Amino acid sequence: NAGVMQNPRHLVRRRGQEARLRCSPMKGHSHVYWYRQLPEEGLKFMVYLQKENIIDESGMPKERFSAEFPKEGPSILRIQQVVRGDSAAYFCASSPRGPDTGELFFGEGSRLTVL
Amino acid sequence: LAKTTQPISMDSYEGQEVNITCSHNNIATNDYITWYQQFPSQGPRFIIQGYKTKVTNEVASLFIPADRKSSTLSLPRVSLSDTAVYYCLVVSSGGYQKVTFGTGTKLQVIP
């Protein structure tokens, strides 16, 4: 059973470009979470999705950021018109049930660098 | 949502037992205490979870006193490969609450 797969592992974008980060949850997991981590800081919750639905996006910036988890295919975190402050590691996690179990399975992260 | 407080960093020599304490004074009845480990350049990994008293697995032990206002993660005989950031979380089983991470405790194991 493969773990949570994230790609790309590293992404370089220039200011104003778009970044798309993909996350394939573990098999059988229908709950997906995105977190952002700045260097030397903890993980900041961004969004929680369950197949085709956004359950909690309270950690998402109001502009330029969006997330989806379609019926088929990976979850996508999209950042439009990137700025230098978007440079960070973005981690995706999945779980077979909701977050009340406390056990989330994380991917290796996607590291975004904005030039 | 119960707030957690843990030391920012700790150093330990190889072979020693390491205890990392986390305080969560406003923990609720439905809350569990959960610990994650994160190695550099990797995603966090769940290591242990408990509600009260003591829980032990192949990686660590978790001690939770009767009032549950704190918890202690115990790592026996640490090695260099245990150098990581350790996060203490309080997770609610009574209705939806997002899983939030603090800044964690950065453990440095010294040869």
Image: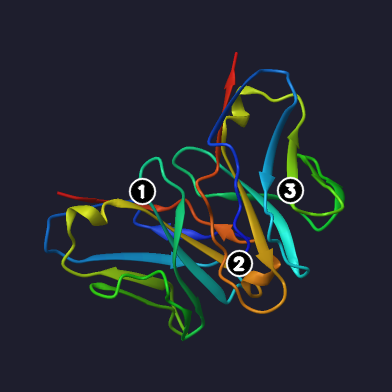
| Chain letter, disc 2 residue | B
SS category of the residue bearing label 2: loop
Regarding residue A3, the answer to whether it shows in the image is no
Q: Secondary structure at mark 1?
A: loop
Residue wearing tag 2: B1
Residue density around tag 2, few if under 14, some if 14–19, many if 20 or more, within 10 Å: some
Rendered image: mark on residue B100:
none
Q: Which residue is mark 3?
A: B70
- Describe residue B37's horizontal placement relative to residue A13 as left or right: right
Residue B28 x/y as whole percent = 73, 67
Q: Nearer the viewer, mark 1 or mark 2?
A: 2
| Residue at x 62% of width, y 30% of height | B82
Relative to B19, B2 lies left or right: left
Residue B58 falls in which quadrant of the image? top right
Comparing A13 with A58, the one in front is A58
Quadrant into which the C terminus of chain B falls: top right
Asked whether residue A45 appears in the rendered view, the answer is yes
Which amino acid type is shown beneath numbered disc 2? Leu
The residue that disc 1 covers is A38
Q: CA distance from mark 1 to mark 2?
A: 23 Å
Quarter containing the N terminus of chain B? bottom right
Spatial distance from mark 3 to mark 1, Cα to Cα?
27 Å
Question: Residue A37's spot in the image, x, y percent?
Answer: 40, 51
Closer to the camera in the image, A111 or B76: B76
